[in-house]
């Protein structure tokens, strides 16, 4: 994977947005790797938890929003408990998820579904589709 490091306004805005949503200081992480070493889902991730933080530190938005890691994380909080600097990695991953969910255009438009389909769809599916608009 080829990645370009820059400090342009888009990169800075992404980093600031992740920090604002997560409430975390990304610069506090010094890449010890303890979060990744303890993560029960690390074997299934394309980017390890410490790498997610590193990518976020450098503003690699495109790589993060395309990664499977942000969806593979089960939010067990093991990474949070292992971090010697107190960085809440799970909150950072959730912030990146929120950024993706807030910008996606492929949500289900339940208003355009036929009434018969609406009656057949489990209520939790409709609730889940509307959560994107409330967070």
Image (tube, grey):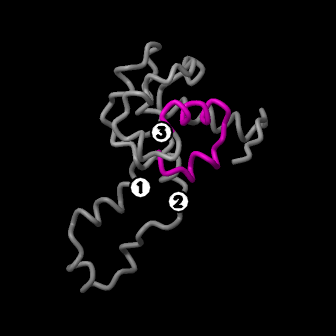
Determine which of the numbered discs, if any, sits on residue 122 in the image: none
Cα distance in 3D space between marks 3 and 2: 14 Å
Is residue 72 on the magenta stretch?
no
Crowd class of label 2 (few under 14; some 14 to 19; many from 20; radius 10 Å): few
Which of marks 1 and 2 precedes in the sequence?
2
Q: Are marks 1 and 3 in contact (CB under 8 Å)?
A: no
The residue that appears at 30% across and 35% down in the rendered structure is 76
Q: Position of residue 2 (x, y in %)?
A: 74, 46
| The furthest residue to the top | 84
Which of marks 2 and 3 precedes in the sequence?
3
Judging by the rendered image, the residue that carries numbered circle 2 is: 104
Q: Position of residue 59 (x, y in %)?
A: 66, 37
Residue 130 located left or right of residue 10 = left
Judging by the rendered image, the residue that carries numbered circle 3 is: 95
The residue that appears at 27% across and 83% down in the rendered structure is 117
In front of the other: 14 or 2: 2
Q: Position of residue 34 (x, y in %)?
A: 44, 22
Q: Position of residue 58 (x, y in %)?
A: 67, 32
Determine which of the numbered discs, if any, sits on residue 132 in the image: 1
Secondary structure type for disc 1:
loop
Query: Magenta residues?
Result: 48-69
Residue 124 found in image quarter: bottom left
Residue 62 located left or right of residue 51 = right
Secondary structure type for disc 3:
helix
Which of marks 3 and 1 precedes in the sequence?
3
Select label 1 or label 3 by which is in front.
3
Cα distance in 3D space between marks 2 and 1: 9 Å
Secondary structure type for disc 2:
loop
Crowd class of label 1 (few under 14; some 14 to 19; many from 20; radius 10 Å): some
The residue that appears at 63% across and 38% down in the rendered structure is 14
In front of the other: 117 or 25: 25
Is residue 63 on the magenta stretch?
yes
């Amino acid at each position: 994977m080829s990645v370009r490091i820059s400090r342009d306004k888009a990169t800075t805005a992404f980093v600031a947005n992740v920090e604002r949503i997560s409430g975390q200081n990304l610069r506090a992480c010094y890449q010890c790797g303890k979060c990744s070493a303890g993560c029960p889902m690390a074997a299934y991730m394309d980017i390890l938890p410490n790498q997610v933080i590193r990518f976020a530190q450098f503003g690699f938005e495109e790589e993060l929003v395309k990664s499977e890691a942000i969806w593979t994380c089960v939010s067990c909080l093991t990474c949070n408990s292992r971090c010697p600097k107190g960085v809440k990695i799970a909150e950072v991953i959730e912030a990146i998820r929120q950024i993706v969910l807030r910008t996606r255009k492929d949500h289900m438009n339940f208003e355009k579904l036929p009434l018969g389909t609406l009656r057949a769809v489990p209520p939790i599916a409709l609730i889940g589709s509307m959560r994107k608009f409330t967070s």
